[in-house]
Image (tube, helix red, strand yellow):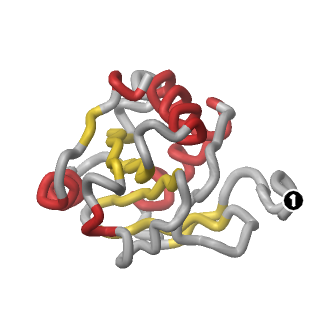
Amino acid sequence: MSYLLTHLPNGWAVDQAIVTEEDRVVVIRFGHDYDPDCMRQDEVLASIAEKVKNMAVIYVVDITDVPDFNKMYELYDNCTTMFFYRNKHIMIDLGTGNNNKINWPLTSKQDMIDIIETVYRGARKGKGLVNSPRDFSTKYKY
């Protein structure tokens, strides 16, 4: 399903996607294109893209093809989702301790829609950190 999402082929394209979007949240899924976790995440993102098109634009970046951001954003996980608004990284408190990104495949469509809506509303108010509508701290036991 990732073929339905826009792939960004290089670092310049990623920068331009983040910098040029004025009114919507930029959702970028960093990861490996053929990783099963990323494929599940892409299915969720592709299925909600039409529903959230007024709030967000969704892109996919393969971190093996575009390693420019791996150190900057600490992209060491197989599948990472990050949010940007008006050239600013928007952090989200999911209850996991890592507020910078979602570093597991979120397979619930409604959870992803709720998170994108929360990020959009908070970012429009000028907030750099928003609280998740749901606590994910007990979802995955490490």
Q: Is residue 112 above or below residue 84?
A: above
Q: Who is closer to the viewer here, 34 or 72?
A: 34
Q: Who is closer to the viewer here, 10 or 129?
A: 10
Residue type at numbered disc 1:
Lys
Q: Badge 1 local density, few (<14 within 10 Å), some, or many (20+)?
A: few
**How many marks do you count on the picture?**
1
Residue 113 in sight from this viewpoint: no
Q: Is residue 83 above or below residue 107?
A: below
Q: Is residue 9 left or right of residue 39?
A: left
Q: Quadrant of the N terminus?
A: top left
Residue 64 in sight from this viewpoint: yes
Q: Which quadrant of the structure image shows residue 92?
A: bottom right
Tell me residue 63's x, y (percent): 35, 56
Q: Is residue 53 left or right of residue 98?
A: left
Q: Which quadrant of the structure image shows residue 125?
A: bottom left
For disc 1, the marked residue is: 141
Tell me residue 36's x, y (percent): 58, 36
Q: Quadrant of the C terminus?
A: bottom right
Q: Is residue 17 left or right of residue 134?
A: left
Q: Who is closer to the viewer here, 121 or 72?
A: 72
Which residue shows up at 51% across the image and 45% down it? Answer: 116
Dot 1 falls on a residue whose secondary structure is loop
Which residue shows up at 40% across the image and 28% down it? Answer: 2
Tell me residue 101's x, y (percent): 53, 63
Tell me residue 7's x, y (percent): 26, 38
Which residue shows up at 36% across the image and 50% down it? Answer: 25
